[in-house]
Image (cartoon, helix red, strand yellow):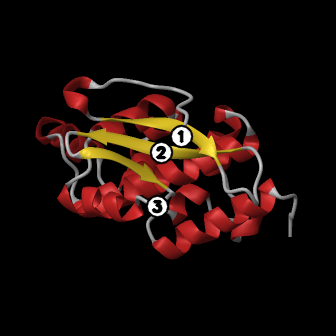
């Protein structure tokens, strides 16, 4: 696996985006989310998903949320922040002292981050991806993608639309 970007966070925690060659049947690179913790590295979207499950259960690092807030301008809106992370801004600021998310908060945040990364890949622009995530989408019956990440079913619908867009299927 070759890393396209490496970042260091205080305490060894943090999330970085890495790229790797996909299976022989696919060409190009696929973006993955890699989370560094003292217990090891976790990558969303590959064979270490069982390790990611363990990380979520033990409490994902709060730095994942901090990175999202820095990168995703719309998360400064308290309503959008709550939909994306499953917690209020006030709870987030309180959690910063604990450095850990609850399993529900960690799962929702990582689900949102995974979809945002896929949107950036599809639209080839952070700004366009962010705009799409917070705007009503015809393919989602007028719902905003950010509103659907609260459930796995909603997230699957968003991922399906992004996959169709990626392959040029607009229906």
Whether residue 139 sits left or right of residue 70 in the image: it is: right
- Quadrant in the rendering for residue 9: top left
Place residue 75 in its image quadrant: top left
Q: Residue at x 46, y 48 (%)?
A: 80
- Residue 98: which disc? none
Assign a secondary structure to mark 2: strand
Report which residue position mark 2 lands on: 33
State the residue position of label 1: 1
Q: Which residue is mark 3?
A: 47
Give the x, y percent position of residue 86: 34, 57
At label 3, counting other C-alpha atoms closer than 10 Å, the crowd grade (few under 14, some 14-19, many 20 or more) is: few
In this view, the residue in front, 5 or 86, is: 5
Q: Is residue 155 above or below residue 14?
A: below
- Looking at the image, the residue that sits furthest to the left is 98
Q: Earlier in the sequence, mark 3 or mark 2?
A: 2
Image coordinates of residue 124 in percent, x first then y, are 73, 37
| Horizontal side of residue 16 vs 9, given as left or right | right
- Mark 1 or mark 3, earlier in chain: 1
Q: Nearer the viewer, mark 3 or mark 2?
A: 3
């Amino acid at each position: 696996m070759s890393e396209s970007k490496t970042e260091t966070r205080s305490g060894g925690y943090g999330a970085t985006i890495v790229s790797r060659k996909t299976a022989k049947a696919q060409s190009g690179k696929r973006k993955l989310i890699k989370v560094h913790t003292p217990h090891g590295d976790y990558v969303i979207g590959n064979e270490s998903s069982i390790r990611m499950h363990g990380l979520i259960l033990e409490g994902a690092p709060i730095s994942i949320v901090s990175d999202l807030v820095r990168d995703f301008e719309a998360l400064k809106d308290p309503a959008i922040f709550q939909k994306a992370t499953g917690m209020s801004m006030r709870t987030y600021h309180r959690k910063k002292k604990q450095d850990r998310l609850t399993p529900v908060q960690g799962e929702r945040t990582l689900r949102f981050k995974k979809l945002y990364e896929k949107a950036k890949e599809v639209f080839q622009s952070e700004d366009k991806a962010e705009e799409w995530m917070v705007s009503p989408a015809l393919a989602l019956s007028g719902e905003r993608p950010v509103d659907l990440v609260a459930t796995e079913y909603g997230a699957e619908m968003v991922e399906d639309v992004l996959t169709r867009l990626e392959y040029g299927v607009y229906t």
